[in-house]
Every structure is written in C-alpha cells, then in structure tokens.
Image: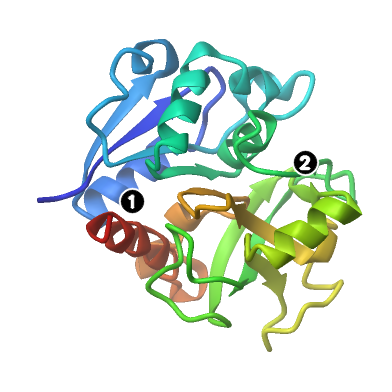
Amino acid sequence: MPMRVIVIQFSGSTCDRDLVSAMKDVMGWEVDLVWYNDALKHLEGYDAIFLPGGFTYGDHLRAGIIAAYTPVMKKVKDLANEGLPVLGICNGFQILVESGLLPGALISNDTLRFSCKWTNLRIETTRSAATNIVNKGDIWRVPIAHGEGRYFLDEKGLKELNENDQVVWRYVNDNGEITKEANPNGSIENIAGVCNLEGNVVGLMPHPERATEAIISLWGSEHGKFYFQSLENYYGGR
C-alpha cells in the first residue's frame, strides 16, 4: 500500500505542487493537496502531514506566523502530539517554529537578501522521520530558496537541542566541514533543519522535493529521495 499524505495549502503557498509532484510522480504516493480551511475537516486518515514552502500571507508580521495561528494548525498540533509525522519545508518549517511545534526562530538571512542556490547538508541524526535510512555524516546536495532562513535559538535552548539530538541537518562545504562560507544565511551553528524530541515533527529550510530527479537537478542530485524514503521507512516501523 502506498503512503497516503496530505499537503496543506495556505494563501501564499508556492511550492505545494513541486512537493505533490515529487511524492506522487516520483514516490508513487497518494497525495491530496487541500486548502487549509477544508483540511481542518479532513486531516484524519493520513499517514503524514506536509506543510509546503512559499510565502504564506505575504510573510506579513513574520514568515509563517499568520498560518501558524490558523485553526487547522491546532488540529495539526494535536495529531503531531499523538505521533503522526508532520513535516515542514522552508515556509512550512517557519510555520512549525511559529506554532511551537519546533524550537527556535527563523529570521532574515544575514545578507538581508533572498538566497536561491544549491547547498550541502550533513546528516546529524538518523532518528528523525526524514533521515532514518541514511547514515550520520552523509552529505546531501539540496537547493535553498528563502529570504528568512536564518535559524536562531538562545544559548540554553541550543544546548538542549544538541544534547537531545534534535539537530537533523547542518550546512557544510564539499568536504563535509562546517564553515562560515558553507552557511548560506547565517544560521546559528550552520543549522538547516531540526526535529522535535520524538522525531516525528521535522523542519528543513532547503527543498528536498527539488532534488528527487537527476534530470532536473543540478549535479544530477537525487538526494531528496532519501528524505521521502526515510518517511516511508518511519511509517512502516510505527
């Protein structure tokens, strides 16, 4: 049986169809793209919930904050707390942070410019729903496209994040080294994605859905497939 997932579409979502295509056409999953008000009535019965990239509500106030306070997110939080996988990519990550499902904040890039390029991501943990079939230290090549992707967390929170093995990806150079030059937005400790304590809620700034087919990926990267294959494996083990 293929996985059955829902992608919640908000006003200003712009990467939703990219995500649907990757999961439906590449992975062979059953995927429903549902408007956020309608999704409130139809969240039950899915194997995972996805929050796509984009610029929900024009990024007014802060990126992701208005979407985070829509009624559907209260239901998403309830299901996440019950153990359902909830994954946010780019703006979806921002929504997860603003809703309190993930720790930290995502603020303007240190360049104060929108950044769209390919990055190297090093796997920091294999216990998340999105990395459980790969090895710690593996490097993925995945593109970014954001203006507010700079991850920040205070000193106490950062210590807990590291101690609890909640950092999932870090930006690195071609040799897998954490350097300032490899950091595209100024994220603290080069953090590109994190998970909750249980590992079922995962946020990532880069776009794995844009690196699932070699024919359309720079350098022929299909590393984004590991993200979705890991979720399949995670679901099978639940």
Q: Residue at x 40, y 45 (%)?
A: 85
Q: Residue furthest bottom?
A: 175
Please name whichever residue, 26 or 237, is drawn nearer the observer in this view of the structure: 237
Q: Which quadrant of the rendered structure holds the C terminus?
A: bottom left
Mark 2 neighbour class, 10 Å CA radius: few under 14, some 14 to 19, many 20 or more: many
Residue 105 marker: 2
Amino acid under label 2?
Answer: Ala
Q: Is residue 24 left or right of residue 37?
A: left
Image quadrant where residue 174 sits: bottom right
Please name whichever residue, 73 or 214, is drawn nearer the observer in this view of the structure: 73
Amino acid under label 1?
Answer: Ala
Residue 22 marker: 1
| Colour mode of the rendering | rainbow
Image quadrant where residue 236 sits: bottom left
Q: Is residue 222 left or right of residue 162?
A: left
In this view, 81 is above or below 213:
above
Please name whichever residue, 24 or 116, is drawn nearer the observer in this view of the structure: 24
- Give the image location of residue 30, x and y in percent: 19, 41
- Give the image location of residue 47, x and y in percent: 27, 41
Q: Is residue 157 left or right of residue 199?
A: right
Q: Residue at x 78, y 78 (%)?
A: 178
Distance between mark 2 and mark 1 Cα atoms: 27 Å
- Give the image location of residue 206, x and y in percent: 59, 55
In this view, 138 is above or below 45:
below
- Give the image location of residue 120, x and y in percent: 63, 72
Q: Residue at x 44, y 70 (%)?
A: 223
Under circle 1, the secondary element is: helix
Under circle 2, the secondary element is: strand
